Amino acid sequence: MHLILIGFMGSGKSTLARRISDQMGRPFVDMDSRLEERFGCSISDFVAEFGMESFRVEESDLLRSVMKEPESVIATGGGTPCADGAMEWMRRHGVVIHLSVPVPVLADRLKDTLSTRPMLSDVALVDLERVIGRQLLVRAACYSGAHAKWDNIQLDDAQLTSKLNSIGWRLREAL
């Protein structure tokens, strides 16, 4: 089974998944990177040309495909768990960890990359925290289906080991 990181864009899913992958000796899968490879363009360009609905269909197809691959540490897209049946599918095939980051921290991390984020590309900086907060409220029910929630993801190696140990019984069963 997989270890799957979910959370809002900018929550650190890819960065932390890569670290966990190294620590656990498991392959690392970044779903956004895989989608860009599949599309031959950025996610923003794909969404601009084909729309968000087409992107979500491709994302759901990729999720199901990745779950059939060897056990790995997966960084999903921010909206991946909100697709119909996605959370159930992820829970059935892995241990799901929700990375929760405060809105001001997310806004600070995302402010310089708004043009590359389809959900935020038209948002003025002055409105960024409010928009992120609203989107988090919409996604709260999706994210709440995770096996565990990690609130502080600025973790040193000892803290990361402790977090992994806190879900160890699930990992031993799953992996």
Image (spheres, grey):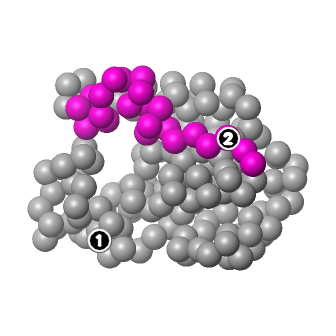
Name the residue rendered at 19%, 49% in the picture.
115
The earlier-in-sequence mark between 1 and 2 is 2
State left or right for residue 10 relative to residue 90.
Answer: left
Q: Residue 111: give x, y in percent of width and height.
A: 23, 64
Q: Amino acid at mark 2?
A: Pro
In percent of width and height, residue 46 lies at: 27, 28
Task: Check disc 2 and report the residue beneath it.
Answer: 27
Residue drawn at 82 percent across, 55 percent down: 170
- Crowd tier of the residue under label 2, counting other residues whose Cα lies within 10 Å: few below 14, some 14–19, many 20 or above: some
Q: Is residue 30 magenta?
A: yes
Q: CA distance from mark 1 to mark 2?
A: 30 Å
Work out which quarter of the rendered image holds the C terminus and state it. Answer: top right
Which mark identifies residue 163?
none
Say whether residue 133 is visible. no
User: Viewer-nearest of labels 1 and 2?
Assistant: 2
Along the horizontal axis of the image, is 150 left or right of 175? left
Residue 60 location (% of width, % of height): 49, 30
- Taking the magenta stretch, the answer to whether it contains residue 38 is yes
Looking at the picture, which amino acid does disc 1 mark? Asp
Q: Position of residue 27 (x, y in %)?
A: 67, 41
Residue occupying image coordinates x 41% and y 27%: 37
Q: Secondary structure at mark 2?
A: loop
Please report the residue visible at 43 percent of the width from the left and 39 percent of the height from the top. Answer: 32
| Residue topped by disc 1 | 108
Please tell me whether residue 24 is drawn above or below residue 55 in the rendered image: below
Asked if the residue at tag 2 contacts the one at tag 1, i.e. Cβ–Cβ closer than 8 Å, the answer is no
Q: Locate residue 149 relative to residue 135 in the image: left or right.
A: right
Crowding near the residue tagged with mark 1, few <14, some 14–19, many ≥20 C-alpha atoms within 10 Å = few
Range of residues picked out in magenta:
25-47
